[in-house]
Image (cartoon, helix red, strand yellow):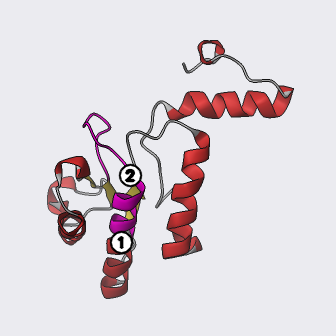
Amino acid sequence: SKEACGPAHMKTILATGELPTYSQVYQASLTCMMAGADFIKTSTGKEPTNATIPVSLVMIRALREYYERTGYRVGFKPAGGISAAKQTLVYQAMLKDELGDAWVNNTLFRFGASRLLTDIERQLYHGATSEYAASHYMPMA
């Protein structure tokens, strides 16, 4: 519970790949927020099924319902399976469309995707040189 965290932010991981229905994802999202979560996260990234667009949409809509009822904004962190910088744009656009500009910042929206960093490095390298570098040339690979 939030009391156990003290002043620290509480992040809850839903392991959505283990929840068989969207209704259960929605209910789990609301339950975590009612328990005081400051962030809800799709998965650890270690499950067979991680962040997906449909599950993320369900969680984002739960965030909206919770905010409308309480006035409190809870953050969202899709995690696992996001390895390309272009994928992040889909999540960002979906979040903005559903929740507005207030959620599109680093205090309410983050990615849990360690493999994503290498692709971001490759995209930045491409922007600077007009060439793509092999992943193993990137410092974070």
Task: Answer with the quarter of the image where residue 80 lies.
Answer: top left
| Image position of 27 with respect to 120: above or below | below
The kind of residue on which mark 2 rests is Thr
Residue 104 in view: no
The kind of residue on which mark 1 rests is Leu
| Image position of 137 with respect to 113: above or below | above
Residue 32: in magenta span: no
Residue tagged by mark 1? 63
Residue 129 in view: yes
Q: Residues within 10 Å of mark 2 (few under 14, many from 20)?
A: some
What residue occupies the far right of the structure in this picture? 129
Q: Position of residue 99 (x, y in %)?
A: 49, 74
Task: Answer with the quarter of the image where residue 118 lies.
Answer: top right
Identify the image quadrant of the C terminus.
top right
Read off the magenta span. 42-60
| Image position of 135 with respect to 60: above or below | above
Q: Residue at x 40, y 51 (%)?
A: 78
Q: Position of residue 2 (x, y in %)?
A: 19, 61
- Under tag 1, what secondary structure? helix
Q: Residue at x 32, y 62 (%)?
A: 38
Picture mark count: 2
Q: Position of residue 113 (x, y in %)?
A: 44, 38
Is label 1 in contact with label 2 (beta carbons under 8 Å)? no
State the separation of the CA atoms marked 1 and 2.
16 Å
Residue 54: in magenta span: yes
Q: Position of residue 9 (x, y in %)?
A: 32, 55
Q: Earlier in the sequence, mark 1 or mark 2?
A: 2
Q: Which mark is residue 52?
A: 2
| Image position of 63 with respect to 2: above or below | below
